[in-house]
Image (spheres, rainbow, N blue to C red):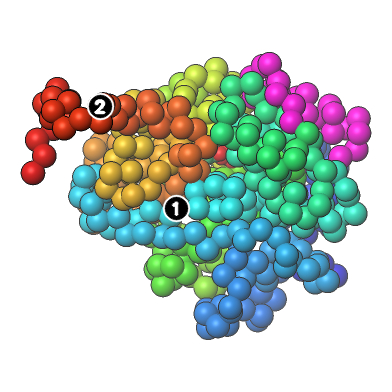
């Protein structure tokens, strides 16, 4: 008997979860992976976890949907990203307990490494040799990296707008890269047709129910790093909705297994120019109204979110806060994160922080609340946006007088 099974998010039908399972065979909806939490309670404790030498995401094996016989060693080192207390950023935001979980420090520089490491392990269990996905960029580069290490061939579809840094990662990792001249929605649809035609293992967001199980390990780490004191709020940027759903699943699992006695409130951050999930939550509606993909935060420019219902459910269940931020607010948060915390985030990676600052400004979060901002992707992936946020350096010929003149021009008074 497997220790995990699949449950349909819509018709609630339960079924075994073979490694190549996708959507519900009865109604076609997205699946959840569920566990026997009583069995987990008997096999894991905080004390056992504290003695484990493995710091990667696989240290939470009891909570992960992998076969007992599966060897998870030998992949890229995913997980164990730092959680910083961000005093100076907190001061700027008016918060006394603000933390940054820098998931941009994963091997291919985004939180998506957690899902891709899982996808590669499940593809191996399924006996597949080729993995494919459509992605705004980070799921793509993380899949290409983990697949390269494990020896899989990959076909990866990205919208033409994907930043060069992410596309270059794909090429370096040896993926077959298909840059689609169209939106993310069109890219996704083309990938789905190709996956069906050639029978590849799918790492597509939401379609593969195991991915959220990888992502949820970020919440396990936050809990452990805070000495099991669950924060009041956790902020994350939202595109397809898989990440926010995964983050919520992680906290729910810990609660269900009796390791924690509290759940955080989620802060769901979307871009003003593309916020279909937050709009539905605010309207108390279960209907997805597609939007244009109008933001420089390319990773969360998702007009038709693939994991809409799971994301909406997660935000609601957590009594969450929805915040929409402008591109200017995202760029400002990138600069603030950099100069007060030493963390370089890509726009979608800084959006969570932008949302926290905005929510605090609107009085939606109390000053003394404990708040974690998950930085989901590293800024070096999208240097053009970094330049837009931070501006140009002082440029001078190699001459002292010229330097002084340039300092004066720039209003810099060196001491
Ligand atoms: C850096 C970054 N942040 C946030 C997200 C949003 O995740 P999701 O699409 O699962 O909602 C993504 C997704 O690509 C991402 O790459
Ligand atoms: Zn169903």
The answer to the question of whether label 2 and label 1 lie on touching residues, with beta carbons closer than 8 A, is no
* Residue 359, picture quadrant: top left
When the figure is inspected, residue 166 is found, relative to residue 17, above or below; the finding is above
Q: Please provide percent x and percent y for residue 150.
A: 78, 55
The mark found on residue 102 in the picture is 1
Asked if one can make out residue 158 in the rendered structure from this viewpoint, the answer is: yes
Q: Residue at x 47, y 23 (%)?
A: 295
Q: Residue at x 57, y 29 (%)?
A: 164
In this rendered view, identify the residue nearer to me: 244 or 144. 144
Task: Please state the extent of the stretch shown in magenta in the rendering.
Answer: 177-202
Secondary structure under badge 1?
strand
Q: Please provide percent x and percent y for residue 190.
A: 78, 24
In this rendered view, identify the residue nearer to me: 119 or 142. 142
When the figure is inspected, residue 161 is found, relative to residue 11, above or below; the finding is above
User: Quadrant of the image for the C terminus?
Assistant: top left
Left or right: 389 as drawn, with respect to 249: left
* Residue 52, picture quadrant: bottom right
Q: Please provide percent x and percent y for residue 341.
A: 31, 50
Earlier in the chain: of badge 2 and badge 1, it is 1
Q: Which residue is drawn at 49% across and 19% down?
A: 294
User: Quadrant of the image for the N terminus?
Assistant: bottom right
Mark 2 vs mark 1, foreground winner is 2
* Residue 139, picture quadrant: top right
Q: Mark 2 points at which residue?
A: 396
CA–CA distance between discs 2 and 1?
34 Å
């Amino acid at each position: 008997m497997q220790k995990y099974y699949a449950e349909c998010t819509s018709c609630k039908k339960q079924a075994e979860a073979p490694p190549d399972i996708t959507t519900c065979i009865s109604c076609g909806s997205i699946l959840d992976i569920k566990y026997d939490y009583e069995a987990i309670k008997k096999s894991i404790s905080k004390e056992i976890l504290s003695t484990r030498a493995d710091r990667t995401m696989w240290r939470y094996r009891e909570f992960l949907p992998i076969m007992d016989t599966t060897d998870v060693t030998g992949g890229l080192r995913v997980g164990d990203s730092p959680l910083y207390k961000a005093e100076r950023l907190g001061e700027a935001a008016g918060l006394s307990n603000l933390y940054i979980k820098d998931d941009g420090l994963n091997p291919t520089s985004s939180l998506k490494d957690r899902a891709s490491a899982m996808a590669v392990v499940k593809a191996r269990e399924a006996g597949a040799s080729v993995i494919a996905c459509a992605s705004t960029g980070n799921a793509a580069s993380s899949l290409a990296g983990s697949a390269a290490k494990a020896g899989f061939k990959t076909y990866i579809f990205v919208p033409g707008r994907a930043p060069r840094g992410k596309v270059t990662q794909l090429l370096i990792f040896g993926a077959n890269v298909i840059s689609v001249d169209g939106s993310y929605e069109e890219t996704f649809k083309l990938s789905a047709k190709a996956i069906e035609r050639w029978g590849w293992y799918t790492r597509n967001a939401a379609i593969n129910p195991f991915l959220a199980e990888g992502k949820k390990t970020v919440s396990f780490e936050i809990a452990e790093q805070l000495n099991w004191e669950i924060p009041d709020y956790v902020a994350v940027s939202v595109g397809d909705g898989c990440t926010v759903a995964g983050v919520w699943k992680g906290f729910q699992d810990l609660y269900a297994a009796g390791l924690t006695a509290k759940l955080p409130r989620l802060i769901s951050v979307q871009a003003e120019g593309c916020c279909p999930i937050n709009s539905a939550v605010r309207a108390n509606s279960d209907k997805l109204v597609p939007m244009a993909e109008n933001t420089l935060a390319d990773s969360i420019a998702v007009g038709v979110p693939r994991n809409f219902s799971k994301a909406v459910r997660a935000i609601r269940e957590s009594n969450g806060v929805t915040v929409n931020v402008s591109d200017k607010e995202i760029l400002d948060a990138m600069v603030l994160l950099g100069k007060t915390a030493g963390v370089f985030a890509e726009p979608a990676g800084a959006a969570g922080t932008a949302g926290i600052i905005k929510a605090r400004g609107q009085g939606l979060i109390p000053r003394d609340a404990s708040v974690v901002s998950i930085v989901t992707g590293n800024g070096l992936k999208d240097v053009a946006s970094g330049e837009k946020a931070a501006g140009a350096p002082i440029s001078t010929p190699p001459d002292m007088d010229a330097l002084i003149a340039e300092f004066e021009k720039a209003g810099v008074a060196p001491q």
